[in-house]
Structures are given as structure tokens and as C-alpha cells.
Image (tube, rainbow, N blue to C red):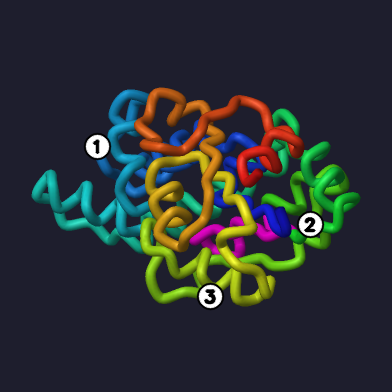
Amino acid sequence: MTAILFGSISTLSDSSELQRSSFNEAFEQHGLGWRWDRDEYRTLLDSNGGAERVAAYAEQRGEDVDAKAVHATKSELFQKGLAGTSSPRAGVVDTIKAAKDAGAKLAFVTTTAKANVDALFDALAPAVQRSDFDVVVTAEDVDDKKPAPDAYTRALEQLGEDAGSAVAIEDNPGGVKSAQAAGLTVVAFPNDNTAEADFGSAEKTDRLDYSTLTAGLA
């Protein structure tokens, strides 16, 4: 294995419930009568995130909503929340260290905004830092978000690696589809809100381990 590609914020730190609560607080601030409980939120996780998710939900309800403004508020709340709640997920720090020791390259491949990624790394430092990764891809770097393969294709190009010798780690079905479409072997690392999701052929784990990731490419 020559490279590990972490996909999405919650592969590093489980922020799924913070995401949901930030959406709900943003809805309240914008005077919307919406509240996503855990069950409803989980049904939305297969669709595009960001303002697109808000817009699709409003359209479904027949409501006229400034989705970009609502999502901007949500992002501000989320970034502030990361500072007080973030910690690395099980096995993440050890896997990053083992990959470096083995000479494998590392990438962080997400289609969330760069500002969210910056806030995440600020919150996780020094345990996990941006400098740990050879390549970081965010929403601003691609035209099409996941489940399109663009983010992973770009990361592989920047790493100078082939998909066949690398593995992706994803926490949601859309991310798995994105990585598989780019030709990558994928390990599903579900977050608190995707534990029961259908990850198809991807192997699932609740704790990362470098030797297990390597074995998957043997």
C-alpha cells in the first residue's frame, strides 16, 4: 500500500451529531419551523450535503428558503463547535503514525468547505495536523462533489499514486461510492449517524488499524 486517503471530516473526528445540532440551531436562527431528529437526519445523509441539502429539503416541503444563507449560519456554528468537542477517532493517530513510518503517503479528501477543514485541524492539533497530510482536497478544489469521483481523482493525481495501490477510508455511503468510482479499495468507518447505513461491498470497521488496511490490498 502506497497511500491512505481519509475522506470526510468524520473519518478523523466524529462530528456527525455536531453537524446535526448546528443545522437545527441555524434553522431556528432563520425562523424556520424545521428540526431534524436523528432518524430524519440519517435519511438525508445519502444526499449531497451543504446548501444543496437545505435547498432539496425546502423544495420537498414546498418552501422558499435562502439555502446558502442558512448553510452559512450552520457552518459558522459548526466551526465554533469543533473547537470544544473534537478528538481523534479510535485508531486514527496510530494509523497516521504507522503510515508515515512505512513511507506511505496520506491525503485528506473531502468536499466540505476549506473553512470547515481549517477549523477541524485547529481543533485536533497537535494530535492530528494538516501537515500530517501530503495532499488536502476540499470543496473549493473540485467542480462536482461526492458521490462524484472528482475529489479522489484529484488527490491521486497530486499524490502521484495509482488507485490500485491505495485505500480510502469513508464514513458515509456517498463517500464510499465516490472512492469506488475512482477505482479505490474502500474501508467504511461509520460515524455515529451512519452505523446502520448500507456501505455495499466496503469492509466495515469501528477502529482503524494500519495492518488491517494493508492486508486489504494484499
Task: Tally the marks.
Answer: 3
**Amino acid on which disc 2 is placed:** Ala
Q: Which mark is residue 96?
A: none
Q: Which residues are magenta?
A: 106-119
Residue 111 shown left or right of residue 54 in the figure:
right
**Amino acid on which disc 1 is placed:** Gly
Q: What residue is pinned by disc 2?
A: 104
Q: What residue is pinned by disc 3?
A: 141
Q: Residue at x 30, y 40 (%)?
A: 44
Residue 107: in magenta span: yes
* Separation of residues labelled 1 and 3 (CA atoms): 34 Å
x, y percent for residue 97: 86, 45
Per the image, label 2 sits on a secondary structure element best described as loop
Per the image, label 1 sits on a secondary structure element best described as loop
Q: Residue at x 66, y 65 (%)?
A: 136
Residue 105 shown left or right of residue 41 in the figure:
right
Residue 217 appears in view: yes
As rendered, which of 113 and 211 lies closer to the eye?
A: 211
Q: What residue is pinned by disc 1?
A: 33
Contact, CB < 8 Å: mark 1 with mark 2?
A: no
Q: Earlier in the sequence, mark 1 or mark 3?
A: 1
Residue 87 appears in view: no
